[in-house]
Amino acid sequence: MLPCDICGEMVTSESDMKTHLLIVHMENEVICPFCKLSGVNYDEMCFHIETAHFDQNALERNFERVDPIQYGTSDDKDSSLQSTMEACASSHPKCSAQSPPTHGTLKHEIVYSENLIGSRKFLRSRENQSDLSETKESIYETMYSPPECPFCGIIEECSQDMENHVKTKHVSLLDTPLEDCDQPLYDCPMCGLVCTNYHILQEHVDLHLEERSFQQGMDRIQCSADLELAHQLQQEEDRKQSEESVQEMEEFHKLQRQYGLDGSGGYKQQQLRNMEIEVNRGRMHPTEFHKRKADLMESLAAGVDDGKTKTSGIIEALHRYYQNAATDVRHVWLSAVVDHFHSSLGDKGWGCGYRNFQMLLSSLLQNEAYDDCLKGMSVPCIPKIQSMIEDAWKEGFDPQGASQLNNRLQGTKAWIGACEVFTLLTSLRVKCRIVDFHKATGPSGTHPRLFEWILNYYSSEQEGNAKVVCTSKPPIYLQHPGHSRTVIGIEERKNKTLCLLIFDPGCPSREMQNLLKQDVVASSIKQLRKLVGNLKHKQYQIVAIEGALSAEEKVARRQASQVFTAEKIP
């Protein structure tokens, strides 16, 4: 059962609900086509037409019979209704007393009984009317006017024609089909709604199809919008990836240029190019240019450094200085004799690692303990050092480091660090180790443990209580991000602070020459001194030399370098 949202009446199906809404709650009033009676609902009007307008004479009789029912007392209402039923039965051919009581007749009588109950409700609603004569006159005045169909609005000439019209054209509205009738029913294939008319079903299905077509159109529009959005997102993603790729390539090329792997040439090309610039700027005479070029070619051919950037005798000068001055120093330890090498026009900006190796080797070549492994060697030039590292890679040392540099150093401006220096020294049978101070061990990013380690390295050859100790220990290679230097000693001051003595390959020869004067001043020594607060890089690595290797030890170290490891402090 379905309740009407307007009046609350219960109906059995959706088709009945549509009929109910159309008839009971339509905008125009339901008006009797024969007598212009209005103000009643659909069921009451059906009963009125069925009982009052089969013929005109019966209308007058029925009206007179209704009159006592409507205005009689409550005591005789039941008898009056009974007489009205008899009058209806006598006037309706289907309900005649002489007709056999068939099943259909019984059903029709039940319908008339229900209509009678509805008529009684209708008549009770008229009890408040005060003037019966005015009601009768109104009915008789409109009785003979041209009747109008209350369902479709057509006008007929007489009441009989209107009655036939209503019964033939609108019979589905007048007679509610019974449950067991043989009238065909049509189910909607899309929603299951039951229709009693094929044309109504067709219109109903057409509405479904129009709705589906509309939904499909909306889906296509939505799909098109989704595709457009997806296309825009893809374009944005491609643009970002392209920008990131370009940025990565630019950074890669920048790193290649920074580390000398951009294919712009090596030591020789840079040396000649910078000398030409000096000539063009008037800082070098063409004659000097050709002389230097000839010396360069000779040095490269021999594989030996030309010595033009070398400063010797500094360790001896420092020994004299500490003996006669430096009153604030309690002890100082100096490495074995070492020469200072600084960068030239050919390696400026990238050659610090090579120059520090030259300093280490210059000390080893002057130390008898390493004559066996370095016999007949001289300090090599930078291209020769590159060739020696490549040879060490070919022997099997440090394959990971070799792959990072594409197994090639000659003809490039590639930087080298602690690993390459360790590899080269080991290949020369020099025993050394790498110690990695990978994080700060003091306040403000300082590395006091680094200073303590270097102090222990040099002070292990303590000779009495002398203020200045010239040890036989080689200098230490010191690497930090972006640069490398060489540690040639350490001071212990009276306030118990430590200070490293460092050779920097970035310091030119003319400044290092000042240390060779007889009256060395403290300002000249200042460029060598580095206190704990001066070394605040995130990480430092050192290569410390500890003696010579036998052939068997060299092979073992080569095998160990397959997976390169370093001692870490802390």
Image (tube, rainbow, N blue to C red):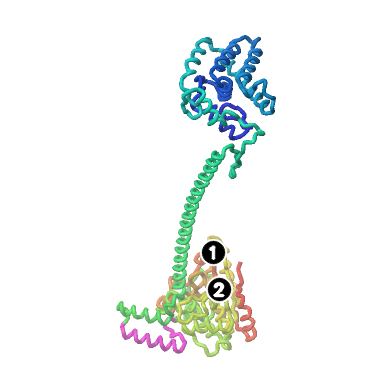
Image location of residue 207, percent across then percent down: 52, 42
Q: Is residue 517 visible?
A: no
Q: Is residue 201 magenta?
A: no
Q: Earlier in the sequence, mark 1 or mark 2?
A: 1
Image location of residue 63, percent across then percent down: 56, 15
Q: Magenta residues, as a range?
A: 285-309
Crowd around label 2: few <14 · some 14–19 · many ≥20 (10 Å): many
SS label for mark 2: strand
Amino acid type at image mark 1 = Thr
Q: How many tags in the picture?
A: 2
Disc number placed over residue 107 in the picture, else none: none
Crowd around label 1: few <14 · some 14–19 · many ≥20 (10 Å): many
In the rendered view, tell whether residue 61 sits above or below residue 570. above
In the rendered view, tell whether residue 51 sits above or below residue 474. above
Between 553 and 102, the one lying in front of the other is 102
Residue bearing the label numbered 2: 542
In the rendered view, tell whether residue 44 sits above or below residue 397. above
Give the image quarter of residue 428: bottom right
Q: Is residue 246 visible?
A: yes
Marks 1/2: CA–CA distance: 16 Å
Between 151 and 218, the one lying in front of the other is 151
Image location of residue 477, percent across then percent down: 53, 75
Q: Quadrant of the C terminus?
A: bottom right
SS label for mark 1: loop
Q: Is residue 403 left or right of residue 180?
A: left
Q: Residue at x 43, y 80 (%)?
A: 267
Q: Between tags 1 and 2, which lies in front?
A: 2
Residue bearing the label numbered 1: 446
Amino acid type at image mark 2 = Ile
Q: Quadrant of the N terminus?
A: top right
Between 291 and 337, the one lying in front of the other is 291
